[in-house]
Amino acid sequence: MAPRYAPSLRSRLGPLLLFLQTGFIISAFYFEIRDEAIHRDIYAEFQDVNVMVVLGFGFLGTFLVRHGFSSSGFNLLVAAIATQWALILMGIESWYDKGRIFVDLRSILVAEMSAASALISMGAVLGKANPVQLILLALLEVSGFILNEWVLLSLLKVRPLNEIMLLHIFGAFFGLTVTWILHRKGSHEGFEKEKFDKKSGLFSMLGSVFLWMFWPTFNSVLVEDHVPWRKLGAVCSTYLALAVSAVTAASVSVLSSARGKLNLIQMQSCILAGGVAVGVSMSAVHQPWEAMAIGFTAAVLSSTGFKYLKSHMLLAFDCHDTAATLSTHGLPGLLGWFAHLILEIKNCDDHTVAIRFAVFHICTLLVTITISLTMGTVTGFLLSLNFWRPPQNRKCFDDQAFWEFPHLAVRK
Amino acid sequence: MAPRYAPSLRSRLGPLLLFLQTGFIISAFYFEIRDEAIHRDIYAEFQDVNVMVVLGFGFLGTFLVRHGFSSSGFNLLVAAIATQWALILMGIESWYDKGRIFVDLRSILVAEMSAASALISMGAVLGKANPVQLILLALLEVSGFILNEWVLLSLLKVRPLNEIMLLHIFGAFFGLTVTWILHRKGSHEGFEKEKFDKKSGLFSMLGSVFLWMFWPTFNSVLVEDHVPWRKLGAVCSTYLALAVSAVTAASVSVLSSARGKLNLIQMQSCILAGGVAVGVSMSAVHQPWEAMAIGFTAAVLSSTGFKYLKSHMLLAFDCHDTAATLSTHGLPGLLGWFAHLILEIKNCDDHTVAIRFAVFHICTLLVTITISLTMGTVTGFLLSLNFWRPPQNRKCFDDQAFWEFPHLAVRK
Amino acid sequence: MAPRYAPSLRSRLGPLLLFLQTGFIISAFYFEIRDEAIHRDIYAEFQDVNVMVVLGFGFLGTFLVRHGFSSSGFNLLVAAIATQWALILMGIESWYDKGRIFVDLRSILVAEMSAASALISMGAVLGKANPVQLILLALLEVSGFILNEWVLLSLLKVRPLNEIMLLHIFGAFFGLTVTWILHRKGSHEGFEKEKFDKKSGLFSMLGSVFLWMFWPTFNSVLVEDHVPWRKLGAVCSTYLALAVSAVTAASVSVLSSARGKLNLIQMQSCILAGGVAVGVSMSAVHQPWEAMAIGFTAAVLSSTGFKYLKSHMLLAFDCHDTAATLSTHGLPGLLGWFAHLILEIKNCDDHTVAIRFAVFHICTLLVTITISLTMGTVTGFLLSLNFWRPPQNRKCFDDQAFWEFPHLAVRK
């Protein structure tokens, strides 16, 4: 008979966290705060991204009725670790050259965006992995993402804006690979506690709405300021794409339901599709209608994917994707990549330039997906070790495996 | 016997949304992003207004215990549609002149404020109308509001700041007219599911608190920058009026209760009264004590209205006002209008000028109320058609009429 | 037999609020809005602090399962009163000199930070005091805090930044003294309703996360702009300290639990410890690793205190500290004070200067603690009068003592 209680993480999680944090503090001896005036703009942008990463992603996962503490708590924990780790990794070059790692708001912001790629992957394994596994996943994923960045920057000379936005594609494929390798027997019957209720749906609505509201910052933050209206364009395009996505997601949701009802969790994911797709194609979107058309297509893809792909992936590929990472980030990300290609080619007068861009753009995607799948596979096999004490099937999607509850808690 | 299930909206809501969204995207071929540097200030203000419209208004209505998904979800949907629609309507003149509709953050912001007038009216019919009806209401209301704006601007030369702030009065009377026409037999007995509980009260507290915190932006955003301290004055006045409202609303709430208890839903509405009233009278408020006195009076009016008017309106006029739109926006709005009149006259040395201002100011109100009531009546009769498949009385205030719930959802 | 219902506050709370608010409005005749351009930066900072005070502190206390309305509602009420009161007290000098009290965003912001000291103390008596007591506590505490400020400024020439940051120490000791004097027989058995559940834990998570996200503003807002990179340093240091605290708090939480589980309420308090400690020592922290080390130590202290001190204080000193004010604000505050001392001495080349600084720094602390304990004692004895009608033990931690609930509210 299986043990009644989830295995204790005391000897795994505690030392791991202490070890990591001590290591980070020791590395911080090489940190130096860049000696410049604070720029109010970057601070406001940093706060917006901070809100998206900590609150948005954190509460988006609280729809799982008995997994709210874990969704929000582990998200904060992983974000805090992954950001510090990304800050160190991104500083290695400067540390090698000058012996110092320079820290300012912009570098923390980029580190948080790299951490976001790990939070996206977390969505795929949410509820089925313990915090030790989530932290290891985040460390490896951030390493992979920064490796990918470095490869794209140094080999293909991709612009920083464009390669950071690939985080949606990178995160989605990484997460799917991990959850595919960590497949549990019994997933097909469904997990007893994988469901939502009236209140948990509202908590995740909160996360979704914060992501929706602040997404224009997320997409515009890395747009260069030296062509000033580009930033305005990025903000307006993202806003319009999100508005279109919200309407389209509701439409597809009601049309694809036999009794004409909306699905809240589907909407929460799919209203964001326009933001993802426009983010990935940002540097090629110049007209509002282009952004809106991308938002429309992204929402249709994402909603349809949520409705039909999720269950098919489980049946056909043994791939259980808790928070629909594929349709929330993967498909809209790929669509954004494709829209970028089409728009760029459309604007080219010269065939040779167009073909060269296409080859370059396809290489960018191939490199990203290759690194993502490779790192995902390595991570998946590492996490499948029993040493990390994963929860039993019966304890999946259950806060009680990881959180103390007062015994006398009775409902009113 | 009445049917057990709410009528399916598949054939109504889905096509309507698709049709609207396609139409908006086609109109967007004429959109052009204004070619100017982004101004960080306007972006921060845009975000604040965005938070108020999407999160504030959305969660304010979640106090209804079984209507949280609808309150927050339909609010987002209606806001996304109404903003796009307002953007197009506001651009008609420029489209006629130059063949383009110019879009920038300021125009999106003003479009969101116009959409807010529809969200205010939605409060009156909340829980009793289906999303199709809400969307039609929003389209007609935004059209009416922009018509009103155009009439006031071109006939009476009202300043943009002043006429946009009339959205509280416009929205309240529009909503009341619609809910009066849509009166349901059986409202007098009360709806079974029209109530709040411990958790739903906290969700709406969240919405209320976000409105309270960001209201200073809402009132100051349209104040012209060229007299710079005017904007500071608007922010400080609004903050002080809101603080006074919060204290006064609590006081009236406890004094008007037989057993000396506070009412959370009453407080959530009435702490905002000062913001509404000061907003409407903004251009005449010059001293902090004036703002505070207006906040005090507005909260007294609003709290008393919430306590006594709501039930009387139902009994005497067959007018069921779910979210107390009259006392939250209508009465404080009228008070603000009146305070504006008094303060303006007080500051006039010349009798003739004072009388001319009074006539002008009264005309402004009369035009607004006339257009609001007329459009409200038209909308009300349109929405009363059975073609839109309104929910049965038993399905009012119930998310299950519109949202999928997993059948196996059991409470812990 | 004890009465079944909590005593009515109609004759206490209503008149008190009316009297205070009328008094504030009358004082406001002397208010004058400072005649200067609004500075966008200060507005954004004001909004962040506003969010922390109203939303952050308000929702942090909602973990109590039946006390959510009171935690969030009374927090708003007390914040609105205490801010107005602080605005008046801070203006007395200018009123005496020039007959006017100048109001601008900076003065409202500082008033809100003074009000925050009262909200910290409220945490210690939360659930055991009625709103009348909370309001009196806030009035006296803000008076004491501003007296302390005045003494430190005029006698010891402490810089404004440093003495305002003492609010954590002042608030914690004030609150502990009050709760110690208000000790109830029966506290040792525990209060029936002092517990959390799945949803209430998520509401307080929301408050905690907002405090965590905006704490960099709280610490940097008073840093002088004239050395521009100081403000950037304050923001980065606070962010890093908070990230370290989050990881460390989780580590200590899991290590100190017999079954290796995390405690959500403990984490919600202790992830903030780094922000408190770095805030108090801000003007001496120059290196990122210093901030991170302080964050680490603060989180260890705070988590250990939460786990062991809370129950010992109740057993040994009859001091029941609802929201763990000692370990959330008291211990990290003291640590910050100590870190400030050490860092300042470390950077001194001259022994005499170091010793003079140490004496000065110790005096600052002694004055603060003395005034805090004295005012706390006075407040405690005042609040212990039966005249204020405190709730019975059975009605502690229960919203039903103060808030109307519809009788027909049945759970789905």
Image: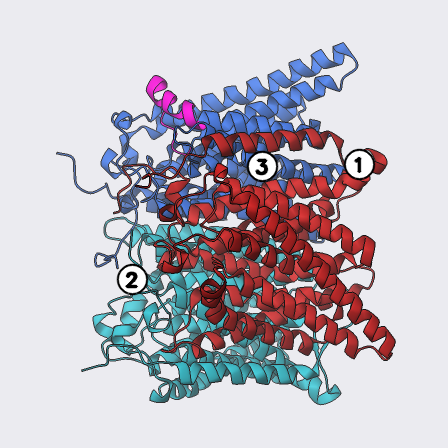
Chain colours: A cyan, B blue, C red
Estimate the x, y position of residue B78 in percent, counting from the top left: 44, 42
For mark 1, name the chain: C
Q: Nearer the viewer, residue A374 or B23?
A: A374
Position of residue A186 relative to residue A212, above or below, is below
Label 3 environment density (alpha carbons within 10 Å; few <14, some 14–19, many ≥20): many
For mark 2, name the chain: A
Q: Nearer the viewer, residue B321 or C390?
A: C390
Q: Which residues are magenta?
A: B306-323
> SS at mark 1?
helix
Most common secondary structure along the magenta stretch: helix
- Does residue C203 appear to the left or right of C360 in the view shown? left
- Does residue B142 appear to the left or right of C174 in the view shown? left
Label 2 environment density (alpha carbons within 10 Å; few <14, some 14–19, many ≥20): many
* Residue at mark 3: B90
Image quadrant occupied by the C terminus of chain B: bottom left
**Residue C368 visible to an observer of this rendering:** yes
The label on residue A195 is 2
What's the amino acid at mark 1?
A: Trp
